[in-house]
Each structure stands twice: as C-alpha cells, then as structure tokens.
Amino acid sequence: MSAESNHWSSYWESGSITSLPQDFQDNYDGEIGAFWESQFESLNSNSIILDLCTGNGAIALLAQSFSLKFQKEFNVIGVDAATINTAAIVKNKPHLSELLNRVNFISNCRVEDIDLTSESVDLITSQYGIEYCDWKLVAERVFDLLKPNGEFAFISHAQSTDIRKTMCEEQRQYMFLNELKIFTLVNSYYNHKKSFGLTLKKLKSAETKLQLAQKSISSQLYASVLQFLQYILQLDKARMTTEKRQIVSFCEQHVFAYKRLEDILNVSEKIASVPNWYQVFESAGLSLIASGDVLQGGLHKAGVYYQFKKKDDR
C-alpha cells in the first residue's frame, strides 16, 4: 500500500481500532489477544516494541496495556503508511486516551523508511499489514532494526479464511453496485455532468434493481445503499445542494470501502500464489521459531501467525 492511498486513512479516521470492528468491540481479544500477550511476556522492563503497519494502533495499545498491568514500562512505537488519527479514537473511545498518549505514533511512513537506530528494537510486531508491503525490503529493514536475540512476530491474512469468504461475497455485492453506477451518478451530478431530472431517473431505476437483488440475498450492504437511495429520491434540487456534504461523504465511504476490500483480497491471492512468502524473512537472516493458524472463537480461522528471532552471532 502506498503512502498516497487515502482509502485506509479514511478508514482510520472513523476511530476504529481494529480492521474487524464487527468482530471486536474495542480491541483484539480472545485467541488473538492471547497470542500477543504471549509475545510480551518474555520481554524485560523498558523493552522497545515497534508495531509495523499499526493502523490505529491495535497491537501497540495491547502492548501498552500489558506494560501498565505488569509495570514493564515498554517504549512502544507505532508506524503506518496511512495517517494515524488518534483524535478520532479518543472521540469514540475516550477511555483509551491514556494508552494512546503512551504510544509514539509515526504517520505516513513506509516500513522501509523508518528512521530508527540499527539493532535498537527488542520486539517488532504487525497484524494484517506486513503482507501488503514489499516483502524483501521489509525483511531487510526488520533484520536491521532488531537487536541480537530480538524477535519479530506477525499475523497475516491467509488465502483461505472465514474472513476471506465473507469478503468475497461482499466483493460480489460491490461489483453489482458498481454495475448500477449509483455512486458514479451522484458524483456526476455534483460535477455538473448530469441534470437533476436525469440523475433521479437513473437512480430510481437503480433502486428498483437493487430492491430485487436485496430480496434474493438480504444483504446489509444493499440495505444501507437502498436506504441512501430512498433518502435521495425524496429530495428536491435545493435540498440536494444543501445535503451535498453528507451525500458525497456516503458515496466516498463506500468507494473507499471497496478499495480496501480489493486490497485485502488481492494480498490474499498474492500469498496464495507464493505460499512460502514468509521465507523472505529467513533469507534476510531471521530464524523461524514458530508458526500456525490463528483461530477466532475457537472455530474460525482468522489468519496465520509467524514468529522469528534474530540470532546473536557476535
């Protein structure tokens, strides 16, 4: 993901902590939370933890929560290529303010561009992020940043997970919405490329088709867009103007959501085409010490974890 891609910045502006807000009310817990706690347990006090592709800091916050609970005084740094919006998090979850203030966040920074001293980090972490990067460049940077005997642990998407199955279905639904050109029609109207009457006529036709599709699969996504269409179709031209900000924002959110969905599915396909992709970290000099499936609720595969160690060859 490039630093210029703002569809992820837009998502983090919502104040969500995780990339799976429908499954985790606050932050990752259960098996995923336990995995990360197991990484923090062996660290000494004052250890430096670097969370890569941190998003809104889910793993960084778990590290600081563990640090406070066991008086470890960890120094936690969170880095992401997107813009990290801590103000949005505090607005939605004010109880996290103290933890957020304890994390040093670095926005708009690619992993390979991190400006930290070589061999300065005790533990490097990442969840649902490393796989989007240039694997070779990241592996080289991780090796350089880790102290001798330092560890690197991450959870990645996998080609076959329950999350991916859900997203594939959602992708099909977004493709149908794209065929209806709902968001394109709205944007064209506001860009003065379509008349008010013609826009509403085409949106009415799209509404009819979407209602038929909704009857067949009962989609939450379709229901949301239908509600949006029904709202627009009862507006006159003057109110279409006064309501422009909210209407355009709704369209933009869905366009960005589809782009994020494509990112996730594309990286899953990339992993499937190179199933041993994680070996790039071994090629860079790290030793794989453990790997396995990550389950959610004891049943659903949420990804794959990998743990590496940098041997002390001094």
Image: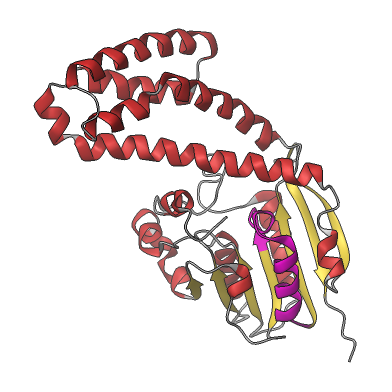
Report whether 40 appears left or right of 14. right
Q: Main secondary structure of the magenta part?
A: helix
Q: Residue at x 46, y 23 (%)?
A: 177
Q: Residue at x 67, y 59 (%)?
A: 130
For the C terminus, the image quarter is: bottom right
**Residue 279, position in %: x, y?**
85, 60
Q: Quadrant of residue 169?
A: top right
**Residue 302, position in %: x, y?**
70, 43
| Vertical position of residue 107 compared to residue 88: above or below | below
Q: Quadrant of residue 151?
A: bottom right
Q: Residue at x 76, y 36 (%)?
A: 160
Q: Is residue 103 visible?
A: yes
> In the image shown, does 288 or 118 lie closer to the viewer?
118
Residue that extends furthest to the front in the rendered view of this protein: 193
Q: Residue at x 53, y 9 (%)?
A: 216
129 is within the stretch colored magenta:
yes
**Residue 103, position in %: x, y?**
50, 74
| Vertical position of residue 173 compared to residue 305: above or below | above
Q: Please count the marks in the image.
A: 0
148 is within the stretch colored magenta:
no
**Residue 51, position in %: x, y?**
61, 68
The magenta stretch is 126-147
> In the image shown, does 21 or 25 lie closer to the viewer?
21
Q: Is residue 295 visible?
A: no
